[in-house]
Amino acid sequence: MEAKLKELKERLIEINNLKSAVGVLFWDQATYMPPGGADARARQMSTLEKLAHEKFIDPAIGKLLEELRPYEKSLSFDSYEAALIRITRREYERAVKISPSFQAELVAHGSKCYDVWSKARSENNFSKVQPYLEKMLDLSVKLANFFPGYEHIADPLIDFNDYGMKTSMIRSLFKELREELVPIVQKITSQKAADDSCLHKSFPEEKQLTFGIDVIKRLGYDFKRGRQDKTHHPFTIDFSIGDVRITTRIKENDLNDALFSTIHEAGHAMYEQGISTDFEGTPLGTGTSSGVHESQSRLWENIVGRSRGFWKFFYPRLQEIFPDQLKSVPLDTFYRAINKVQRSLIRTDSDEVTYNLHVMIRFDLELQLLEGKLSVSDLPEAWRERYKSDLGVKSPDDKDGVMQDVHWYSDHIGGVFQCYTLGNIMCSQFYEAALKAHPEIPSEIEKGKFDTLHNWLKENIYQHGSKYTASELIKRVTGKELTIEPYIRYLKNKYGELYSL
Ligand code: ZN
């Protein structure tokens, strides 16, 4: 049996080598490739992806997994070997259900639709992309139907990113959260808005970069196993556990943007850097779900990076780097500025409190689309309506309305937005567990020390990669099912102090 497991592992590593090569090509395209390389690069990536996919759906892998079934049963659930067989089988069974010609059609349409979307968006012309989005909806329904027997048509799509979560679970979790959030948002926005003008002075790019790098080095991002470059949209990408890269973008007149997106991406990257090296190159060697991944980026970005204690340590340093801009700005003003809550149009610019309302709008609308209760032609209006009723803002155009996020236009419709809110909920639950084990963490953060928290995360979350599903992991780490209570406590505590709630 060990020989069969060895063979399975060797095959998986070979497939992972191809996928990592695609990753390097993608990273290069996003960072340094001249525009002239675009067509050839698309071909190169698609050839490698096709090879990787063919190798994975090879019936020989299915046969190995079948032969390994009794061996898997003889092992403990927690063992590396059992997890490798279990998770590989899950991925394999999913991959073989989707026909290769459909997969190719979806990828090709995604890249075409993305192209049209970027033009349509800059021209603020939804009708240009509408037929492409209609086809995307069609393909998304077809994709879900490769997995018959679902409770809700979005369930298989949610499974791709947040395995094991169902529409019904997310709906009730979101409903509960919404009931708590709406009164908090109302109370905060009825008060005087925080003054964040101190963040919108001129902050030279190089200095912002240097400061961001100093911050994430202290948090624990390992530059010997990573690097940071500039891209249009920040992202994290890994080619191996020893090479996990991040990107950032800098706006001279917005100190928020680079700083918090750098911490956010470093959070994703530390998760990948912390996975057990035994898992390298296998389906276990990556974060377990999009929701858990977001919980790790948001824990560092929001719970740590937007806390008062964090800035007790870092603010004097930031003032030293930007004396003209910040010397006369007190810590308290700065702290309020980085935690300003407001009703806004753009999800990615929104604050911790209103953020989830943006996600819920998208989640509900994509369910209606998939259920056939909403047509793509009625989507822009439905979007405007929801922004008016939920956030009290009116989008002046579709560019910053229904066309603001790339997801539906490049990926598919369904199952792609819930992870952001799941991440917000999970990170508070994880952080409470960390504080229970180490009540000294907040006072260490005030001294610029992050290793207790970082080590706790490595030990309890990072090292396990995909060995446990999100719900298994949450239960193991916190002793409870996923619950919104810690998140609501966190928001009420923090914003109760900033505003009168
Ligand atoms: Zn993220």
Image: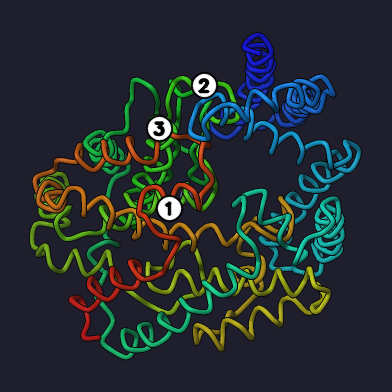
Q: Mark 1 points at which residue?
A: 475
Indicate the amino acid at tag 1: Lys
Closest to the observer, 201 or 289: 289
Q: Name the residue under label 2.
A: 280
Q: Residues within 10 Å of mark 3 (few under 14, many from 20)?
A: many
| Cβ of mark 2 under 8 A from ligand 1 | no
- Give the side of residue 338 with respect to residue 372, left or right: left
Sequence-earlier tag: 2 or 1 = 2
Closest to the observer, 306 or 198: 306
Residue 1 is drawn in which quadrant? Answer: top right
- Identify the residue at horizontal 36%, vertical 71% (top origin): 485
Is 24 drawn above or below residue 341 in the view shown?
A: above
Secondary structure state at the residue bearing disc 1: helix
Q: Name the residue under label 3.
A: 463
Indicate the amino acid at tag 2: Glu
Is 237 drawn above or below residue 139 in the view shown?
A: above
Q: Residues within 10 Å of mark 2 (few under 14, many from 20)?
A: some
Q: Percent position (x, y) of residue 155?
A: 71, 60
**Label drawn at residue 384:** none
Q: Percent position (x, y) of residue 94?
A: 76, 41
Is 402 drawn above or below residue 254 in the view shown?
A: below
Determine the residue located farthest toward the top in the rendered image: 3
Indicate the amino acid at tag 3: Gln
Residue 386 is drawn in which quadrant? Answer: bottom right
Q: Percent position (x, y) of residue 21?
A: 63, 21
Do callouts 3 and 2 mark residues in contact (Cβ within 8 Å)? no
- Quote the CA–CA distance across marks 3 and 2: 11 Å
Q: In which quarter of the image is the C terminus?
A: bottom left
Sequence-earlier tag: 1 or 3 = 3
